[in-house]
Amino acid sequence: MLGSNRYGKSDIRVVKLVRHPDRHDLKDLTVAVAFEGAFDVVHTAGDNSPVLPTDTMKNTVYALAKQHTLEHIEAFGLALGAHFLEENPHVSRVVVEIRERMWERVEVGTQPAPSTFLGSCSETRTASVDYSRERVSMRSGLDDLLLLKSSGSAFSGFLRDRYTTLADTEDRILATALTASWLYRESGGNFTRLWGEVRQALLDSFSAHDSRSVQHTMYAMGEAVLELCREVEEIRLTMPNKHHLPVDLSPFGLPNENDVFVPTEAPYGLIEATVTRNRNV
Amino acid sequence: MLGSNRYGKSDIRVVKLVRHPDRHDLKDLTVAVAFEGAFDVVHTAGDNSPVLPTDTMKNTVYALAKQHTLEHIEAFGLALGAHFLEENPHVSRVVVEIRERMWERVEVGTQPAPSTFLGSCSETRTASVDYSRERVSMRSGLDDLLLLKSSGSAFSGFLRDRYTTLADTEDRILATALTASWLYRESGGNFTRLWGEVRQALLDSFSAHDSRSVQHTMYAMGEAVLELCREVEEIRLTMPNKHHLPVDLSPFGLPNENDVFVPTEAPYGLIEATVTRNRNV
Amino acid sequence: MLGSNRYGKSDIRVVKLVRHPDRHDLKDLTVAVAFEGAFDVVHTAGDNSPVLPTDTMKNTVYALAKQHTLEHIEAFGLALGAHFLEENPHVSRVVVEIRERMWERVEVGTQPAPSTFLGSCSETRTASVDYSRERVSMRSGLDDLLLLKSSGSAFSGFLRDRYTTLADTEDRILATALTASWLYRESGGNFTRLWGEVRQALLDSFSAHDSRSVQHTMYAMGEAVLELCREVEEIRLTMPNKHHLPVDLSPFGLPNENDVFVPTEAPYGLIEATVTRNRNV
Amino acid sequence: MLGSNRYGKSDIRVVKLVRHPDRHDLKDLTVAVAFEGAFDVVHTAGDNSPVLPTDTMKNTVYALAKQHTLEHIEAFGLALGAHFLEENPHVSRVVVEIRERMWERVEVGTQPAPSTFLGSCSETRTASVDYSRERVSMRSGLDDLLLLKSSGSAFSGFLRDRYTTLADTEDRILATALTASWLYRESGGNFTRLWGEVRQALLDSFSAHDSRSVQHTMYAMGEAVLELCREVEEIRLTMPNKHHLPVDLSPFGLPNENDVFVPTEAPYGLIEATVTRNRNV
């Protein structure tokens, strides 16, 4: 009567300072670990003998963070997954999710400061490792990249029914908080360099695209990544449509020349798609 | 090269007042709608002709809320799903998710007030309808029910490795923010009454259980629901372990008689399981 | 060149279990402590000798929580303030702010459970103690009490200028998240009983009032508290106006009989006032 | 019996696009307006005739945003304050608070894109205008600038009592989310340029300072601003101490070479001070 189940530790925060002679590097990670496996007696009989405590998962993250370079979060995720599977024969699957907050160096004069950082970005770099006895699947990604384009975006010619009141527009603000994750064809490589290339491809295509809809632009962004980054097999994109509504200024005797908008939080459109090299998704 | 995709509107807020001669009833819903179907040209060619705007989805929620009793959010979800599938032959699947904030009547003297409400609960009632041309699947549930038991909870006899520092405990605080959702055997009935019965079964079993672990209690709660509510086929439970750490008072010359704790937000344990009438999950 | 300054510790979380033979009581507090005093050399010369670490403030909250009944958060705030002033002659003023999350007992059958609690309310009880060498000022209060009335609320006859588009309404939803704090005439007494009386007076008057505006109802609520609770000298009320906008259903051929609304988060009205026994505020 | 009172509109969101031939500029503001004045009858008699609706305040923000360059939020705040005081003789004081979210241009190749923006920063620029019949007081500022320094920060030689357990440290991470606001000597000028200069002075001094405590660094930052920016009369700084606790790796047979830390959210230190050109604060 017990169906699928998993357990783990979430929101494990760890900051590591890599001390070079002339500067510090800073790594700021949030890690989640989850186990699946032979845990039925834990649920049905209260027998804890197979349970590695989630507190130990946390300790393991700390201990391995100490011993790992953390240069690529993908590699750290793989190391954690391999460790847990190796040490725990009764575990069949380990999922490790890592989020990296990106700090930049403060500029003092024209020089980057050796050990002072500015971290105000909401955008995070992500990696997700799904490690089972049979296979390893790894995704790299980014979360919460706020993007807005104020030209080259239309939405018209859509389906209308009796509840449709939206007007066609040939010129609207398109704003989103992009979440993307992608699969590499091979699970090795310079993930940090690749991550930067994918991110730039996303920015460039979002910027250049003549958008007929969020879907249209999202697909173009996925295509651009697959075209430019041969290492990427598939990319998943989520783009909430953060609506900017033109204000009706006519009661005040003023024109709205498509220049004054109210951004709204709720409701919002939610658009998701996967773009892949072949249709076997 | 386009893989799975969906689009829709999230966070559609609607409040409805049902005006009885002697009192008002209040319904406070947050609705999300998502479509799947024949939308390839939208992505690949910028052709919007199949796109029912998400703004229209929102309008439809308003219009149908006006015409529906909203007595059971499950029934409202079914009505929305049926409407969208019927009106849009090119849509193959509609997912409707509804959250209901529960307001209670203010008591004035010993009488419930006819039209004044108190709404401070974070707990929400949920329904999720997954409506395709082939079948309808519906889940009822609740989110964010904060529960704490201060006796009858232990965690000991667990697996230890070189990174384990946690001590056995026979008496700890067990606290969680329960999320549960369940499938009914048939998709009709007095959902509001059933919801109350499932919720009470969860509370009773959480309270009565002699807990060896979160998993152990979670399973007992699932079993209790299946035993008491014949209409439920399967229940999914998510129980974050909101740790309460005993404070070390010894540096201050004080004993900690298991009575002073620090609740921590991060990291937290995350325990999930499905309990079902048969193993075909 | 150093002006006013203060330092302290915020968000100190502590949970205490009071173990009775037949049941547990649960206290869940969040405490903030701030010091003012002779700290100039800390800022100007980097001399830390006058600085009691904020970590020690935290420890002190734990240690005193162990030794105090916590029956009334007001009394605990006074104890903390007195302790810090007594032990630190160079400190001139201590401000202690306490928030209590209120857990209720789970009902099992018709009986309250002895050690299982339900804590889903966002509403918190608050106390603020401002303790200086010269005087002690104490406020009790509550935060984030969500209230809504669906009859007896109008807003009309207001000032109009060229930017006014709002229509008069004689029947609207009035919803708020009430924050209130009040001064007692004397700083002793059964604060928990008094707190319940003030809260009930706020609920009763909000419910009974024939409202012409938020201001009008807020003042009536303040008056009701001062009338019913002789111990209260002054009350401060903050009532955000959580707008519920009627949906225009006419494009769909439906009437809106003042029954379908969209609650909005932003922007919101913000109304604040103090009601006092005399004008020397 | 009515004491101090105010009312207004908060969280008024407005985005304005300034359309140049070769590019767009983007202004993203959140505005709050509050009135004080002769409003007693509103509270005590339910007479709304003096009440300019908060909805009108919102409309006014939209209308004036259309007509204003928005080049400096300070100037827009002054314009709003002056408008409301002029139009409403019964209003004695208007407080306008503006937050600006800063979007940067996306770089495409080596060129900034003409109409694509990236807005992932949590940091906001702020202005607060307090406008009464007698005087205008204006503060500029910034909120939520995350800063971290990993060298040049110590905390030792502090006061110890029986509840102190903290050890001296000569080398710790100092991290904060800086909030600052400052008064200009005159209420005119190139506020955007000045804002950048103050911000850079804060970054430079934070980076360069040999810190004995948060207070010590905060004061040095205030001094640096006053020294470099002759236009600034006074600066108020708030620096939560976002603790980074070294992880005890000894149970795992590993040294912690001051390189592995857990950042914690609660509790946190809260340090505030004003630095001014003279002591008359």
Image (tube, coloured by chain):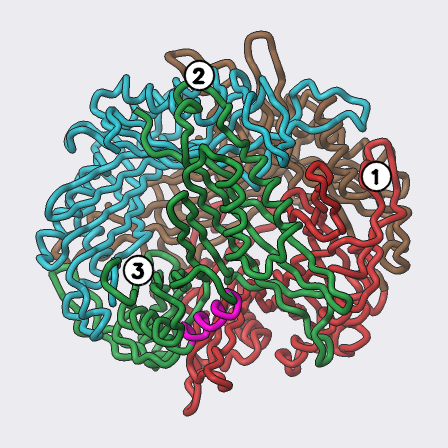
Chain colours: A cyan, B green, C red, D brown
Q: Which residues are magenta?
A: B191-203
Task: List the residue tagged with mark 3.
Answer: B272
Q: Residues within 10 Å of mark 3 (few under 14, many from 20)?
A: many
C-alpha distance separating marks 1 and 3: 63 Å
Task: Examine the image and state in which quarter residue B181 appears.
Answer: bottom left
Q: Residues within 10 Å of mark 2 (few under 14, many from 20)?
A: some
C-alpha distance separating marks 2 and 3: 42 Å
Task: List the residue tagged with mark 2.
Answer: A209
Same chain for mark 1 and mark 3? The answer is no
**Looking at the image, do the residues carrying marks 1 and 3 touch, with CB atoms under 8 Å apart?**
no
Residue C278 on image: x %, y %: 85, 67
Secondary structure, magenta segment, majority class: helix
Same chain for mark 2 and mark 3? The answer is no
Task: List the residue tagged with mark 1.
Answer: D134
Q: Could you tell me the amino acid type at mark 1?
A: Glu
Quarter of the image with the C terminus of chain B is: bottom left
Residue name at image x 28 percent, y 17 percent: A227
Quarter of the image with the N terminus of chain B is: top left
Quick check: is B202 in the magenta stretch? yes
Report helix, strand or loop for mark 2. Answer: loop
Task: Examine the image and state in which quarter residue D73 appears.
Answer: top right
